[in-house]
Amino acid sequence: MVKIKIPKNSDGKKFTSRWRYCVGTGRLGLALQKEYIDTLKFVKENIDFKYIRGHGLLCDDVGIYREDIVGNDVRPFYNFTYIDRIFDSFLELGIRPFVEVGFMPKKLASGTQTVFYWEGNVTPPKDFDKWSNLVKAVVNHFISRYGIEEVLKWPFEIWNEPNLKEFWKDADQKEYFKLYKVTAKAIKEVNENLQVGGPAICGGSDYWIEDFLNFCNEENVPVDFVSRHAYTSKQGEYTPHLIYQEIMPSTYMLDEFKKVREMIRNSPFPNLPFHITEYNTSYSPLNPVHDTPFNAAYLARILSEGGDYVDSFSYWTFSDVFEEKDVPRTQFHGGFGLVALNKIPKPTFHMFKFFNAMGEEVLYRDEHMLVTRRDDGSIALIAWNEIMEKTENPDKEYELEIPVGFKDVFIKKQMIDEDHGNPWGTWIHMGRPRFPSKEQIKTLRDIAKPKIKTGRATSNDGYVNLKFKLGKNAVALFELTEVIDESSTYIGLDDSKIDGY
């Protein structure tokens, strides 16, 4: 039994909403699908992410860059039909684009190397002048359609993980820096106040960030923010349909956040914002860990503490409408999404939703709990119990003394664990149907809800005693609010007269 007396007053520490700043998505062209937009609307309503980031802005399925042959001339044509639909949909839902500039249109590409099922070209442009003109045309179009005041709020990130040869031909740093310089200057030529940044690398190559910032300083290249990705899975065991990987402790990711923040502080640009534009446990959309309660419990600490070190961190991704490794072959396939196919929320979705209920004033925080006071004086508490290894007794018991500013207290508890809010577990009980029936989908949606329990307590000397137990991979949200009791307004009220009461 862990006993904790929560302080009545904070030490000035604030819980920021940096975890909610941005969320990732599959390639932008997927936004033309109904289920994608329906799911994004559902996620926005429940978690309220502010920005969305995804690959493929300039890929051929979005269709911006085209060429016309007129006599002996090749004339670029910029087609904004699809990107207008996509960004209109985002903005209508109240979510702004965090613009990733890439990949290379095939007609502008210097080579044929591609990445993913949908063949995003990852080679430099064969003509940097045409590339620069394309970038300027796209940015000018955004301003024309949405207004400069709106577009000034959009960050423009140049490319994706150029430190990997899979995402940038030969992982050629010098060539990436050239691409960044041309692209950043093209954007700034449209409007010098637009935000540009990079290098959008994944972990394992942080020297790129030092080199990148030194390059920008020495070459007088604009940079308004630094971006990086973070995953905690090791190399895996591959099967034809899945991958299994060992996950390192969550402190590994937090230590990466701290390390890169310190690198920026020691750079020629010590005050630049630092954005984690992708993070998750596994970097593969075929790892079943993403579908599990463990994923939720594990990442809770990242949400609790990550904002201390970075300006934003963007969960990869909001939906399993995602095709990097081909069209998904089954209902649960290890996809990154907070929401599975057929709009079925995963445990991690509910963990995010729980954090959405937290207040700003931090009363208490440790590696398994966060207690906050909201503006109206109510208390929101989230606790988690990730189990990294098999153990005979995974349960954790708590007894808390929680400060409240009112006498009568309504207590609402929501919890997900192996037995609650775990549609993946129910899907296994069903026999893992690849393409579930409508009735099976209904059952999965029914089960994909937290366990909810309510109660009432009376405070004593400004405190409420709260006892609870967390099972394996549980995440629980407690909300303590004031009771405004109107029972006395009911004339003749006597619940003892109700049969069975």
Image (cartoon, grey):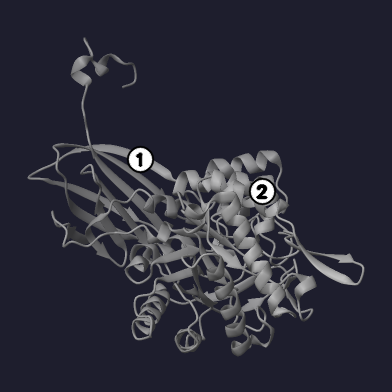
Q: Residue at x 39, y 71 (%)?
A: 273
Image quarter (top left, top right, bottom left or bottom right) of the N terminus = bottom left
Residue 112 falls left or right of residue 376 = right
Work out whether residue 269 or residue 479 is closer to the camera in this orientation and state it.
Answer: 269
Work out whether residue 420 or residue 20 is closer to the camera in this orientation and state it.
Answer: 20
Residue depth check, mark 2 versus mark 1: number of the one nearer the observer: 2
Q: What x and y, as percent, mark residue 446? A: 55, 40
Work out whether 320 lies above or below 183.
Answer: above
Q: Residue at x 39, y 55 (%)?
A: 475
Residue 85's tag is 2
Furthest toward the top, the residue is 492
Q: Residue at x 27, y 14 (%)?
A: 497
Q: What x and y, as percent, mark residue 166? A: 67, 80
Q: What x and y, as percent, mark residue 266? A: 34, 86
Residue 74 falls left or right of residue 243 = right
Q: Amino acid at mark 1?
A: Lys
N-term-proximal mark, 2 vs 1: 2
Location of residue 261 by image quarter: bottom left
Work out whether 293 lies above or below 42.
Answer: below
Label 2: which secondary element: helix
Q: What x and y, as percent, mark residue 216? A: 48, 84
Q: Can you identify the residue that label 1 sits on?
A: 453
Label 1: which secondary element: strand
Residue 319 at least partly seen: no
Location of residue 170 by image quarter: bottom right
- Count of labels in the image: 2
